[in-house]
Image (cartoon, rainbow, N blue to C red):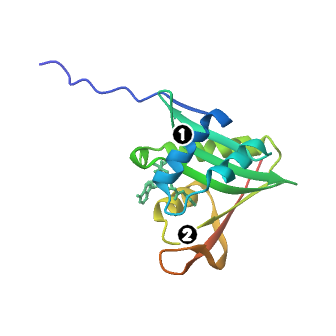
Amino acid sequence: MSAQATDPAPELLIRPMTMDDLAAVVRNETRSYAFPWTPGQLADSIAGRDLCSVVQEEGAVVGHGIVSYGAGEAHLLNVCITRDRQGRGYGRVLLESLVEDLRVRDVRTIFLEVRPSNQAAIRLYESAGFVEVGVRPNYYPAATGHEDARVMAMELLD
Ligand SMILES: CC(C)(COP(=O)(O)OP(=O)(O)OC[C@H]1O[C@@H](n2cnc3c(N)ncnc32)[C@H](O)[C@@H]1OP(=O)(O)O)[C@@H](O)C(=O)NCCC(=O)NCCS
């Protein structure tokens, strides 16, 4: 009996986001968040000086990341993998790519906020080396009222 064939891993590419990606990014954002960024907010980030990347799988945009940075500090604003591609390691690949892009821009510290209820994201950030440095009370809108934010940070060492 012949060995069972296994599907090859799909080709994954992390590349800069452009305006041509906006429709796909809006679609993934809307599918993945209860409170998604608006198309205008996403377009402003692409047109501005944020670091914006997409995850492309076999030609299709399946995730995106957005970071603001300056004066040696960065703020991770958005990390999103579209719902049906989550749990395959794509979020980790995207985060590692963003961190490397920030390293070459002389960023020393990266900050982020995350909902305490978002266990997938917290696990991703903790395993990447982020640690909790504070809490912002009632930071996020929630289904009923507001939810605190955990503030996390990671130092980029040489
Ligand atoms: C958070 C998110 C970016 C993670 O991306 P992903 O591609 O699904 O995650 P990965 O497959 O790379 O896994 C990364 C880590 O998260 C963990 N993880 C992924 N999904 C998880 C889940 N549903 N529950 C618990 N942990 C989970 C993995 O186990 C892995 O940790 P490990 O290697 O220590 O086991 C993705 O779930 C997402 O886009 N969610 C919606 C948008 C969002 O909440 N973004 C974060 C805002 S702060």
| Of residues 102 and 15, the one drawn nearer to the viewer in this rendering | 15
| Of residues 66 and 73, the one drawn nearer to the viewer in this rendering | 66
Q: Amino acid at mark 1?
A: Ala
Q: Amino acid at mark 2?
A: Arg
Residue 84 at what x, y percent from top left? Answer: 39, 46
Q: Which mark is residue 117?
A: none
Alpha-carbon distance for marks 2 and 1?
Answer: 24 Å
Q: Residue furthest top?
A: 2
- Residue visible at 66% across and 77% down in the picture: 136
10 Å crowding of disc 1: few (<14), some (14-19), many (20+): some
Label 1 SS: helix
In this rendering, the label closer to the viewer, 2 or 1 = 1
Q: Are marks 2 and 1 in contact (CB under 8 Å)?
A: no
Residue matched to label 2: 115
Up-down relation of residue 136 to residue 26 (above or below): below
- Residue visible at 32% across and 27% down in the picture: 7
Name the N-terminal-most of marks 2 and 1.
1
State whether residue 143 appears in this view.
Answer: yes
Q: Residue furthest right?
A: 71
Residue 57 at what x, y percent from top left? Answer: 48, 32
10 Å crowding of disc 2: few (<14), some (14-19), many (20+): some
Q: Which mark is residue 24?
A: 1
Q: Is residue 146 left or right of residue 110?
A: left
Disc 2 under 8 Å from ligand 1? The reply is: yes
